[in-house]
Image (cartoon, rainbow, N blue to C red):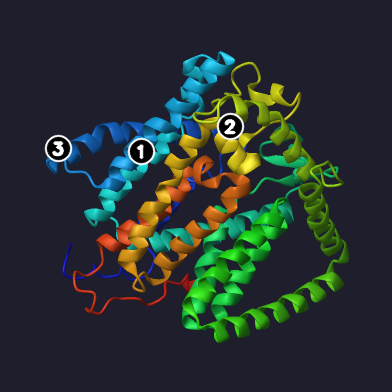
Amino acid sequence: MRERIAERPSGYAPRHVLLALALFLNFRTFQYFPGMAAVEEAWFILCFLAFAGFYPLWKLQEGLRFTRFELYTLAVTLVLPILPALGAYGEFGQPLVFGLLAQRSAALVAGLLLLLIAIRSRAILVADLERALLIAAWTSFFLFSAMQLLLDPSRFSDYQGTFVLLASGKYAFRLPSDFLLFGVIYYTLRGLRTKRKRDYVLAFVLFVSIIGGNGSSRMLCICLLSTFLIFLYRWRSLGQSLAATLRFSAVLVLLVAAASLVNPAFIVARGASFSSAFQVVHNGAEGDDASANLRLIEILAAAPYLQKHPLLGSGELSHQWQGGPTFLTSGYFNDSDIGLFGIVFAYGVLGLLFFACQYRYALRAARILGAHAGPLGDAAKGFLVFSAIDSVTTGAFVFNLNITLFFILVLSGIASQMPHDRHLPRETAPCNLPELAS
């Protein structure tokens, strides 16, 4: 570990744009966009070839020394495709090749090891990642906002279920919110640290973009609120936390009141969706909310397989083999829709525990950093806390494993580039988009 952290590069450079583009591909942000399937497949192949070609050579040069996080990530790249392929072969008779190809995104996890090498060798600085993530967040904001304002989603009805979704008789674009979520968490937690109102405004702008284009924003709002409350009560005294909670509640009431005046139908619809979803969960029977009803049907369809294969799961069915898992419900089935139930369905309890071990490495890196993580480290911690809460209903820490492992890698990278002596001064100035946040 160097004696001092590398100097923060000044301004934004082409390398940050290229890094942001690589992050878009690794997060699979555009996987459902028309014409992007071939690009995504090419990225999978490139990640695999780069890993197979460079990683072994690098480790040989290092004398075959591995950190525990590296060994865990290598194990993940094997377990992620092989375990569900074997499960689906044993339970449904799906050929192994279909099961392995269904999890070819494991190449993205392997590619993270190359990023880890680049960070440790300081070919990529933590500050570069911070700028690239902010570029990705604001690019998502402007791109998705322009799509919603200028394009009619019904014109893309041929891509229903992928690029566009049909809900309550209306088409809407399917817009991944991972980078927007990062931005909301980044600015909110930075605001908690610095007490600057500008950070809260930037977070609010990105948050509005999320709930405006995300049909499943109910749980997202609950998970975000839970995440911020956890950090608020950890970073402030009880009295300060209660006062901040009351102020936030007052502002939220005012915003809801203002929104109800501008667009009352939207507020009524959101309120009704929360109520309907709660009734489905409370009563255990179908209600008025189509999304909650679908998840109840999927849980009931998965229940026999949870009982039959509780330890190792029933595997992952490829959509390229006999139409995929839709026969389980005579219509639609997606294991990521049912959160922890979906993880146990595909990987079993043992698989769930294995993948949950990633948070152990996150906690270890967070303890090393302590209060010296900086805005990016705080945001990485926040995203991981959010993912843990959100995974109850989405299974994000398994089905979006490449994303959660990336933020654990970020924490590890910050720790590797910290000064050897914690008391040495470190550059902790916030990183802003000059045109948008200055």
Sequence order check, earlier mark of 2 and 1: 1
Q: Identify which residue is drawn at 44% across, 53% down.
A: 20
Sequence order check, earlier mark of 2 and 3: 3
Sequence order check, earlier mark of 1 and 3: 3
Relative horizontal placement of residue 31, taking residue 5 as reference (left or right): right
Q: Identify which residue is drawn at 60% across, 63% down.
A: 224
Q: Position of residue 109 (x, y in %)?
A: 40, 40
Which residue corresponds to mark 2? 345
Q: Amino acid at mark 2?
A: Phe
Looking at the rendering, which quadrant does residue 70 occupy?
Answer: top left
- Residue in front for this viewpoint, 108 or 296: 296
Which residue corresponds to mark 1? 110
- Residue in front for this viewpoint, 309 or 170: 309
| 426, above or below 282, in the image | below
Query: Viewer-nearest of labels 2 and 3?
Result: 2
Which residue corresponds to mark 3? 60
Q: Identify which residue is drawn at 18% across, 62% down.
A: 1
Secondary structure state at the residue bearing disc 1: helix
Looking at the rendering, which quadrant does residue 159 occupy?
Answer: top right
Badge 3 density bin: few <14, some 14–19, many ≥20, Cα 10 Å: few
Q: Is residue 31 visible?
A: yes
Separation of marks 2 and 3 at Cα, in angstroms: 38 Å
| 155, above or below 201, in the image | above
Q: Position of residue 133 (x, y in %)?
A: 45, 59
Q: Position of residue 373 (x, y in %)?
A: 36, 69
| 345, above or below 92, in the image | below
